Amino acid sequence: MDDSMKRLLQRLVRRIPSQMLRTTLDKWGRLTRAQQQSMDYTLSKWALTERLLAICEENECAVKHLTELEMIYVMDNPNQGMWYAFQLMDPEDDAPSVELTQFKEQFKSHLKELIKHVSIKIKKHTDEAVWIRIAWGDTFSRPNHLKPTYVVHYLQTPYVFVTTLTSKQKPLLSQALVLSTRHQAVKDANLSGRKLGAIRDLLMRQYEQVFPTKYPSPLKENNETASNPHIEREQAESAANRLQMASEAFGGGMLPQLQSAVYKLETKFRDHTNKTMTEREEPFRCVVKFASTNLLESLRHCASSGIASTPVTPLLSSIPLKGRNYFVITDNGPGPSSQTRQPQN
């Protein structure tokens, strides 16, 4: 086992929590029963790494076996980095007929034509998603397995989800995806998040969007003091109305756990008393970011509880409606990004 393989295994063992290591190794299936029994998971990560290194040496494991182990862990635990959504455009007539074997062959063939040194591994998940692991090299260097790109694509859909992709790698990946899926182009969907399932559900509308029209009145307090029944009825109707409008804007049940929404403002300065600023050619720019562990749930609660006014402004309701969390607001109103964002490492 060379140094690069040792570094890959060391980094992988450090990355996998100790309580998950046994399960991940069992799914890997590369250890004999005796080797499995020799693993003491109460030991330190350093000791576990040394034992695994010895086992991999004994089993003559290759890089492909270690990348397989990494893919098992990442597929089971996808919320490790920032995911970016993309959308395939203008499908050809035979696009719906592309099946897994054909896609794998075409994708590998096209990407290897574009870049000399690249390592590609493709697996199908139990939820029908096709997972792709790409280790990039270049004309003179071997693939770097320490910084792979992961791509998730559901065949027969136009959606692709990517993590850890540089601006240099993006056109190569885009071309390979377009050719292997029989489409004409791929565009940024302006949607990103740390939870892959959340941005997938939001973009593919896989969450509850059937909104009930009747809600029960709020429960009365046990020691509720006597009050005017007309005021109570009016307050209950107002609360039910707010809840209705909040649900219509964001959804009725469990919502995708989106972490942020970004609004970029580009506007001209308008003030007839300040000629210098008004005649400025460059627009003013600023960025507003909403952040939460569950942004859509937070916004829905603000609207339904009366913290935020209703009906909900289209700037916020556009997040689930359009399946995006990145907007550029110009003097002409909200619109798509005027420039393509580059996913960061």
Image (cartoon, rainbow, N blue to C red):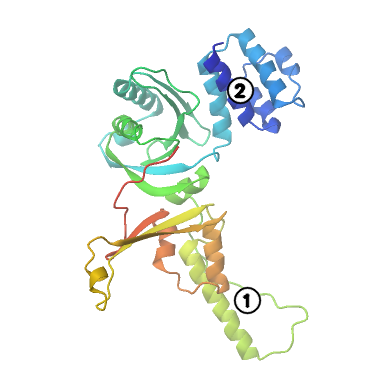
Residue 204 in sight here: no
87, 316: nearer the viewer: 316
> Residue at image x 52%, y 52%?
259
Location of residue 208 in the rendering, given as x and y in whole percent from the top left corner? 51, 56
The quadrant of the image that shows the N terminus is top right
Task: Answer with the quarter of the image where residue 171 lies.
Answer: top left
Three-letter residue code for mark 2: Gln
Q: Which residue is mark 1?
A: 217
Q: How many marks?
A: 2
- In the rendered image, which quarter contains the C terminus? top left
Query: Residue 178: x and y, percent?
Result: 30, 34
Crowding around mark 1 (Cα neighbors within 10 Å: few <14, some 14 to 19, many 20+) is few
Q: Residue at x 66, y 33 (%)?
A: 17
The residue that mark 2 highlights is: 10
Residue in the image at 56% along x and 20% along y: 7
Q: Is residue 125 left or right of residue 137?
A: right
Per the model, the C-alpha gap separating discs 1 and 2 is: 57 Å
Q: Which badge, 1 or 2, is on the more N-terminal residue?
A: 2
Q: x, y percentage for residue 101?
A: 39, 24
The secondary element bearing badge 2 is classed as helix
What amino acid is labelled 1 in the image?
Ser
Question: Nearest the camera: 309 or 283?
Answer: 283
Rendered view: 342 above or below 319? above
User: For the residue labelled by badge 1, is the local secondary structure a helix, a strand or a loop?
Assistant: loop
Question: In which image quadrant can residue 34 be found?
Answer: top right
